[in-house]
Amino acid sequence: MTTLALTGIRVRAAKSGKLRALRRNKLAMTGAVIAAVFVLAALFAPLVAPYDPAQPNFDNVLAAPGWSHWLGTDDLGRDQLSRVVYGARASMQVGVLAVVFAFIIGVPLGLLAGYYGKLADSVVSRVTDTMLAFPFLVLAVGLAAVLGPSLTNATIAIGISQIPAVIRITRAETLRLKHVDYVAAAVANGGGDGTVLFRHILPNASSALVVQATVGIPAAIIGEALLSFLGLGVQPPEPSLGVMLSSAQSFLAPAPWMAVFPGLAVVAATLAFNLLGDGLRDVLDPRGATR
């Protein structure tokens, strides 16, 4: 049997072992199931939501949870379940798109800084350190205020705020990987910078980047809820978990369900992705796992 075939067998065995280890992690699997529910609800919101989330019904204002409205209605008689489903859709949209935006910009910059070093590393690192001087949510709020209130601008603001973390992870992995034997062998065999970066370094840094993505999504969900709560994200009457929480402030005593259910949705979504991220970290990056 050739060396290449043996290598392929070892790689498949390692992947199979990681999948088994992930399936044995009950917390990670619980997070994966809950995250999948949110993603499916977001994708099929028109089919899942029993009512139009923006349609008021003034004959059924502040109705308590019951058979007709499982999560009750709000101050305009709108169905809370439908609004939570569509609010989760907005949260998932921002969570995924903001992370994708951050990766599109952050990964190339991290590769550039880690691989070439010197001036490139100095410039990228200084800009990154400057952005990291501001807490994530403070930076997101500031950028959203400058860009203007909308779901698109909230996504961009949160994505920009996540770029520094992506750059640091990518840079650290690049610094570690560029000195390993197979990268040195690729350089010795005449591999260009593009080949080394995108065929050898980036694929082997993917584990850390996947974990970072699962950490970035819940942060983006919280960021979207905060921006919408402050009026810098989704604009009424469009549903958003943050908008729902903001509207519920005046009705905490007579209609607590207006705040409880969107709040639980935010907690469940962020907790699910964090549990999944912890499980993936333990499987993909054992050096950082806590035992």
Image (spheres, rainbow, N blue to C red):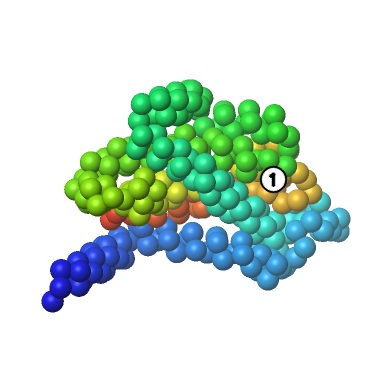
For the N terminus, give its image quadrant. Answer: bottom left
Vertical placement of residue 64 versus 8, above or below: above
As helix, strand or loop, the secondary structure at mark 1 comes to helix
Residue at x 36% of width, y 34% of height: 116
Q: Along the horizontal axis of the image, is 109 left or right of 153? A: left
Nearer to us in this view, 61 or 227: 227
Q: Give amino acid for label 1.
A: Leu
Residue 225 visible, this orientation: no
Horizontal side of 47 relative to 121 (left or right) equals right
Residue located beneath label 1 in the image: 151
In this orientation, which residue lies closer to the viewer: 144 or 237? 144
Residue 62: image x %, image y %? 76, 52
- In this rendering, the answer to whether 134 lies above or below 55 is above
Instruction: Report the residue at 76% width, 44% height from top.
Output: 235
Q: Residue furthest right?
A: 58
**Would residue 65 appear left or right of 181 to someone viewing this image?**
right
Residue 36 position in % (x across, y down)? 49, 63
Crowding at dot 1, Cα within 10 Å, few <14 / some 14-19 / many 20+, comes out as: many
